[in-house]
Image (tube, coloured by chain):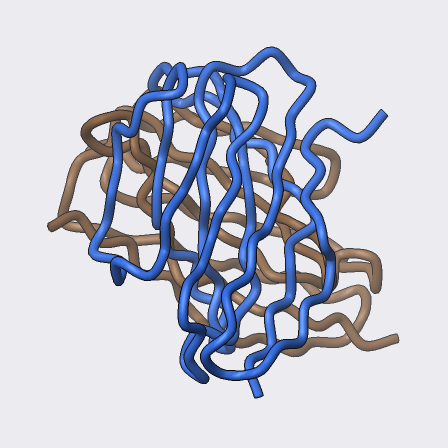
Amino acid sequence: DTAVSQTPKYLVTQMGNDKSIKCEQNLGHDTMYWYKQDSKKFLKIMFSYNNKELIINETVPNRFSPKSPDKAHLNLHINSLELGDSAVYFCASSHLFQGAEAFFGQGTRLTVV
Amino acid sequence: TQLLEQSPQFLSIQEGENLTVYCNSSSVFSSLQWYRQEPGEGPVLLVTVVTGGEVKKLKRLTFQFGDARKDSSLHITAAQTGDTGLYLCAGAGSNYQLIWGAGTKLIIKP
């Protein structure tokens, strides 16, 4: 009964390829997020969706495009992958109120070679 | 821009010792959370503090929110090897966004 599940857990791909990471939550939350954690462990928000609508869009290259088909899913598609995209990507979900707990997936370790 | 600074960035101590890690900002937060992240996993919430001066205890972990709600500390008493992990603080910013610190990597040696 995984609360926030993302696939794949590991992704190794060549520069220039296009890849997608999928995320699903079964917690009934109305808000989902994508975070990027680099090698220094700094957690940086990329996108946030509330009820399938984009509410946070940080400075992220246009090659990254989130898609939310419904409240329980938020997928991340990355075009023309670059070496610098290598990182761990976390999906998370929460209710939308101050201090709401964020529940994270296990992460997808993306390695671009 | 709201920023959260955590210190120290890295801490390695022997089992049984006490330690304190800090989370500081020049901004006021309506609430602040502490998460722990273990290798290969996502962060997991430990506690949320809301009121200035609030102190919460979770077994051997004591969390304090500063009076002005700009800073917080996490104190661990008699550290155990199971406490090893990355400790992240996150403040509730505008637009319901969590502002994250860079984390303190804690290693407890047996």
The vertical placement of A81 against A58, above or below, is: below
Identity of the residue furthest to the bottom in this view: A113
State the residue in front, B24 or A32.
A32
Identity of the residue furthest to the top in this view: A28
Residue A14 position in % (x across, y down): 57, 82
User: Residue, x 49% and y 63% (percent of image)?
Assistant: A37
Quarter placement of the C terminus of chain A: bottom right
The vertical placement of A28 against B79, above or below, is: above
- Chain colored blue: A
Total numbered badges shown on the rendered structure: 0
User: Residue, x 75% and y 57% (percent of image)?
Assistant: B83
Residue B27 position in % (x across, y down): 15, 42
Residue B98 position in % (x across, y down): 35, 38
User: Residue, x 55% and y 43% (percent of image)?
Assistant: A91
- Chain colored brown: B
- Residue B38, by quadrant, is bottom right
Say whether residue B10 is left or right of residue B24.
right
The vertical placement of A113 against A51, above or below, is: below
- Residue A25, by quadrant, is top right
Quarter placement of the N terminus of chain A: top right
The vertical placement of B71 against B92, above or below, is: below
Residue B92 position in % (x across, y down): 31, 31
